[in-house]
Image (cartoon, grey):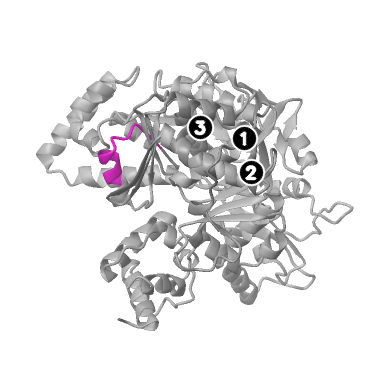
Amino acid sequence: MLDLAKYSSIGAALKDAVERFADEVCLIEADREREKERLTYSEFNAHALPLARAMQDAGFAPGDRASIIMTNQSKWLLSAFAIFYSGGVLVPLDYKLTPVEQWQLLQHSGAKILVTEYPIWRQLSAAPGRATAHNIQTVLLSEAPPDIDLEGAYRWEEFCVNAAPAFVPRERNDVASIVYSSGTGGRPKGCMMTHENYLEQCVALTSLYPFWPGVRYLSILPTNHAIDFMVGFFGPFTCGACVVHLRTLRPEFVREAFVRYKITYVSLVPLVLKNLQKGLQARFAELPPGKQKVFDFLVDVNKAFTRSRPRLWLSRRLLKQVHAAFGGELQAIIVGGAFTEPQTLQFFYDLGIPVANGYGLTEAGTAITVNDLKPFRADTVGKPLPGMQVKIVDPGADGVGEVCVRSKTIMSGYLNEPELTAETIVDGWLRTGDLGKFDAQGHLHLSGRKKNMIVTEEGKNIYPEDIEAAFESLPVKEFCVFAANYIWPKRSMVGEQLIIVIHLERDQSVTDQLKQEIIQRNNRLLNYKRIHGLVLHDQDFPRTASLKIKRNELAERLSKLDRDRVILPL
Amino acid sequence: MPTLEQTTQEVLNLATTHFRLAPGTLAPEDDFFKKLGIDSLQTLELLSRIENHFNIELPDYEVQGVSDFKTLAERIQSRL
């Protein structure tokens, strides 16, 4: 692995990595059963430099921003390399957002270049919002059909100049990327991550879960996500490892890829991990009774021998068929993005497949704590990573308080939001808004949220403020959406729900018509954004001088009511 | 080759069967994420079923961002 302490930027580290590991394979791209591309580090460099030069010739200057909206593929990483090489700031956006949301964030980010895929562009160019994002000067499109008018956009494959680009060094404290943690409805939260944030996080993570030449990481989580960016790009590249991209995420092809490419690591969100668990449990249940007994016995033996630490060589022998289905070389599954239930973690560990469970948020540079497997603990989110100072602020009698973090991996702030930044980072400590406590072994236990938000099993952060647009002009006096656990704190990281609080007009009552309207509007939302209940409030909402609802005050008022009685299910 | 209307109807029938809905529940303009309340994994399962039925390959990136049956049918039609 490169000694990252010696580097001041992502670009400088990647530039050295492609030279040092020149002959190692860094990227494999497969589409179903067909392998489409396989690049060594030197080939990767040869592909990326002409792109960097073309960007520079198009006026992309140091400190300029460039956005990538792509599914996981080699061009994502090649484009990011070219951006960092040129001293640019990367704005990775979620390809699963709606085109309207993407335009909003593109405009907010101030990106000059947009790199995207033609099918995504087709949706983007048809959506309102294009006219407002004047900042986008150059659009690069991959996978565009041959005979089509791109209306001023460039084909990614042809956007190259065969001359050496200038390498632009950056300082550790310069912004490397702007990552949107969430908040596309009202207030986009663009986390400004510095080069130092990434360099330090990479050192900390690879000390627990190392990469080396020969390691194959299966990249499934979207690369714009902080986890995949780190363990599916920067981490493996600085260690000479290989990233495997699949152009389809159909379960049958993902299963095949584990075996074909002998995958070492993969990252998943809890929802996918849980689905994997269900699938395996269904297959185990189909075993004939005799085989089932033998299997259960082998699992028990594995459990007994891996109590203190994983013993992969033993687990792979005892439960050969299970491990063979994962390719036989899987070191660990990395799970992140949301809270994972302990029983799911335990299920995999009992099969001899360690799950690197942890806790983190984009603002903290991905991970804050990670399970170090010494021994495996399914009931906690692990210990702080090296270099992380974690403290519990204002603990109650039970030791539970707000988790606060200080480290070199904390973002420099939210883009264009100095007030929000000042509320979030106080005296160098990031206030996570999550509640937890440490146990005697130094493991962190999370037990709920202090902030008004929920996180779904797919790892999506939902801010109630963003949901309110769906209920705009609802025929009531006023309304407000909350996370129920924010009003009535519940010591749980699962089963989070949104509710709508409604103040009716004088003499108005909840008619079937009103209820139907709420239900109809709710149904227009994606299922994970839907509200679950309704609370009626008979007083004016407290408001600021500029007439914004004082959510904290309203929540405090509501907290005095009995949760189970006041929430009317929809 | 079937018309776009026929393809759309076939897609609606497949989704109706796959998710065990009453006939006529789904319409071409329906957003399948919202109407069916399905997540991305369940959508992939439906796509596999559609591919098998039409005997085509529908790349994930080709249907990225598509959320209504009519547009999905158009993407299928272009590959028939």
* Membership of A446 in magenta stretch: no
The disc placed on residue A65 is: none
Identity of the residue furthest to the left in this view: A290
- The residue singled out by tag 3 in the image is A234
* Residue drawn at the location 49% of the way across and 29% of the way down: A381
Vertical relation: A238 (above or below) A471 = above
- 10 Å neighbourhood of mark 1: few (<14), some, or many (≥20)? few
- The residues tagged by marks 1 and 2 sit, at their Cα atoms, a distance apart of 8 Å
Output the chain of dot 1: A
Vertical relation: B44 (above or below) A197 = below
- The residue singled out by tag 1 in the image is A166
- The residue singled out by tag 2 in the image is A56
* Residue drawn at the location 59% of the way across and 59% of the way down: A533
Nearer the camera: disc 1 or disc 3 = 1
- The residues tagged by marks 1 and 3 sit, at their Cα atoms, a distance apart of 21 Å
Q: State the image coordinates of residue A302 (x, y, percent, origin top left).
A: 24, 24
- The answer to whether tags 2 and 3 share a subunit is yes
Q: State yes or no: discs 1 and 2 in contact (Cβ < 8 Å).
A: yes
Output the chain of dot 3: A
Give the image quarter of residue A10.
Answer: top right
- Tag 1: amino acid: Ala
Q: Answer with mark 1 or mark 2, whichever residue precedes in sequence.
A: 2
- Tag 2: amino acid: Gln
